[in-house]
Amino acid sequence: MTSPKIRVLIVDDSAVVRQVLTAFLGHCQEIDVIGAASDPIFAMAKMNQDWPDVIVLDVEMPRMDGITFLKKIMSVRPTPVVICSTLTEKGAETTMQALAAGAVGIVTKPKAGLKSFLEDDSGDIVHAIKAAALTDMRRMKAMTMASHAAAVKSHHQSSQPTSAPSALAATTDRLVAIGTSTGGTQALEVVLTHLPRVSPGIVIVQHMPEKFTGAFAARLNGICQIEVKEAVSGDRVIPGRALIAPGGKHMTVIRSGAQYIAEVQDGPLVNRHRPSVDVLFRSVAKYAGKNALGIIMTGMGDDGARGLRDMLAAGARTAGQDEKTCVVYGMPKEAVKLGAVQQELPLESIAGLIEQYGKAN
């Protein structure tokens, strides 16, 4: 018995983008494009007659912007939304707003014409739609609300005058490596906004296109007590700082004396991704060994599962987000199958695990 096709609605003010996406997705056996609309008003009229499984949504449109439309969808009938965004600074900032409002993924618009769009990015579009279709929207809505509450609380706490934490000058003996994908932007917000300023150094791979990780890191940095930044080669992994791998680049960790240093480099796709969680985890296994904690979180696919197993074999502690709190229970599930996860725990407990790990002798 074959699985039902994923029913997709495309909402974009560009007739060319609508035509290209409709034509390409129409050749995918697992996807059925049930319609295309030039703006959210037309889209809502179509949806009231035939509600889609997944919406591919532009964020800059006439009559009603994509963010307003997204919030309306989430309040009326939560539905997986994949944002179709441009590779611009403004587009990245708007996309972060969309992810915070409950969107589950990002695809980028043509960078160099329609031909390259189809040749270079079509697999990413299909992957994003498939991941979106697997999303637990009930969990996504709850997590979005939790992340908003945590952000407000953390922003209030970080605005209070405090002395600089002495732990920032401490040794970098321990570090935490986190890997995540679909649903990860909201999940990371929940985790990082709950961490105190004195926390172990953290390195993160979140599957996200280039240009968007900088805006994502800046958003988190503004609402967290710890420093959050997009990594560049040479950045030290120090207490009170989280480094996020830049989209389109791999990130590894090396050791220089008593210090851990992030390295950012090009390289082939690994498990369909660049940055790849496996690439990060394997470097942590090699250079940090037993002085690391590896955490694999919500996401589709198996990226990070084998790298987490390598970390465990090197003596690291390992953990995975549990099925109940994952938006997509894919990456943690594959890690569990490999025996790479020492403990599974809910999203709400991961910040506490990191904090306790930093305090342990």
Image (cartoon, rainbow, N blue to C red):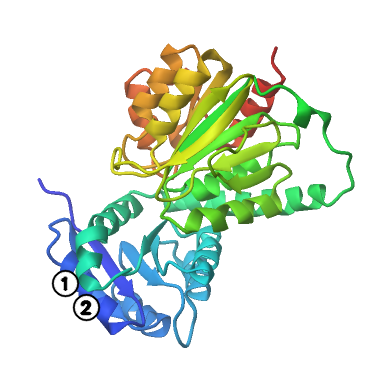
Quadrant of image for the N terminus: top left
Which element is circle 1 on? Answer: helix
Q: Compared with residue 168, is residue 287 higher up or lower down, i.e. above or below?
A: above
Q: Residues within 10 Å of mark 1 (few under 14, many from 20)?
A: few
Residue 75 vs residue 250, the one in the foreground: 250
Residue 66 appears in view: yes
At numbered mark 2, what does the secondary structure look like: helix, strand or loop?
helix
Which residue in the structure is indicated by mark 1?
23
Where is residue 304? Give x, y as percent. Answer: 38, 31
- The image quarter containing residue 122 is bottom left
Say whether residue 86 is left or right of residue 361.
Answer: left
Please name the amino acid that badge 2 sits on.
Gln
Judge left or right: residue 340 versus residue 198: left
User: In the drawing, does residue 255 fall left or right of residue 265?
Assistant: right
Discs 2, 1 touching: Cβ within 8 Å:
yes
Disc 2 marks which residue? Answer: 19
Residue 312, by quadrant, is top left
Tell me, for residue 128, which label it has, or none: none
Residue 344 is situated, as x and y percent measured from the top left of the image, at 48, 25
**Quadrant of the image containing the C terminus:** top right
Residue under the point 39% across and 19% down: 310
